[in-house]
Image (spheres, rainbow, N blue to C red):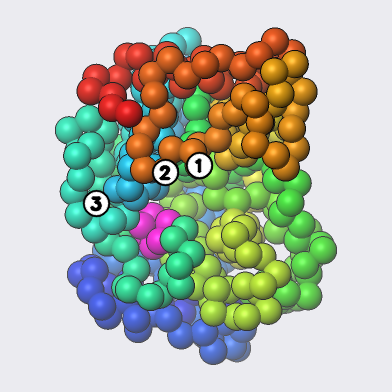
Amino acid sequence: MGFRGKFFFPMLMTLSLFLIIRYNYIVSGDPPLQQDLPGRRSFSSRDDVISSVKTPPKKTKRLFHTAVTATDSVYSTWQCRIMYYWYNRFRDEPGSEMGGYTRILHSGRPDGLMNEIPTFVANPLPSGVDQGYVVLNRPWAFVQWLQQAHIEEDYILMAEPDHIIVKPIPNLARGNLGAAFPFSYIEPKKYEAVLRKFFPKDNGLISKIDPIGNSPVIVSKNALMKIAPTWMNVSLAMKNDPQTDKAFGWVLEMYAYAVSSALHGVSNILHKDFMIQPPWDTESKKTYIIHYTYGCDFDMKGKMMVGKIGEWRFDKRSYGDKPPPRKLTLPPQGVPESVVTLVSMVNEATANIPNWES
């Protein structure tokens, strides 16, 4: 039967969470327990998990809710403020199907952005469970948010703090398909032997696992309510399996989402132009999101300095304990347009966000 989620999720977020962390059930042949969130209708494994989403008339907007998971660290906070600024800039522009916005704060307590950014406070995993891999809190935070929040939109965009929206985003999901960015380093075929622990052969070809993470992904709310608990359990199980943890490293949680989506029969339209990642992607004109996960290092002639600290650089990791200053120095001539656009957009945001401190 494969991994079908063997656990219930209690309404009270307490240390009873430990009860879900049991890994010997992953590929057992026992009938699966109900996986739906408390208070939700039960679905059988044969149900179409997004069958309740109505197909609207062509002229009706199919709004999606943008959800960003975050911590209360300075590093996360300044990225969230920039991300939210650009969401607001494009939300109501022609072509946009962006609806509401939520920062899902998985630090367990309110912080200083509660009045600036719509925020849902989620509990973190119990101490030690993430083993220092903080993104394990992401699927658990989504489970809590989906369980407790009132979400008006039928679709959800899962995004991250270090995303900058470049232009209005339409709903790229279609029918029973989600929409996702394909990552070159997510390679299900290469790791088939490892993934079969979580996606047994009874579930079909390994190619059913899309080369995606959970972000950026636009998916129906009903589908995500099915996927999220499995995503959480698979993430924890993978982290506690030494072979899998070693194989996947920092992208483990991404593989867990891809597996969980496949387990629930939710395939994705792969949009290469959904997102770019400077400096390796050099043009921003066709994209919807800039993901500034990599450092941008160049000499003063505009040549990339790979593996070295550049004479000119922008790297988010340089601002772990304080936000970047207003009016960052623009890159030298010859640097790719995507990097120039990134820094210019950071500068515009910081110039217009009140009480920006550095």
**Above/below status of 76 relative to 351:** below
Q: Which residue carries the number 1 mark?
A: 317
Front position in the image: 152 or 167: 167
Q: Is residue 207 magenta?
A: no
Element marked by disc 2 = loop
| Quadrant assignment for the N terminus | bottom right
16 or 294: which is nearer to us?
Answer: 294
Which residue appears at 65% of the width and 45% of the height? 268
Lower sequence index among marks 3 and 1: 3
User: Which mark, by number, is residue 121?
Assistant: 3
Q: Which residue is mark 2?
A: 320
Nearer the observer: mark 3 or 1; the answer is 1
In 3D space, how far apart are the residues under numbered discs 3 and 1 (Cα atoms)? 25 Å
Q: Residue furthest right?
A: 190
* Secondary structure state at the residue bearing disc 1: helix
Q: Where on the picture, by quarter, is residue 323?
A: top left
- Range of magenta residues: 137-143
Whether residue 182 is visible, yes or no, is yes
Decide whether the magenta segment is chiefly helix, strand or loop: helix
Where does residue 331 sit, x and y in percent of width and height? Answer: 61, 17
Indicate the position of residue 234 as horizontal and vertical percent values: 54, 70
Cβ atoms at labels 1 and 2 below 8 Å apart: yes
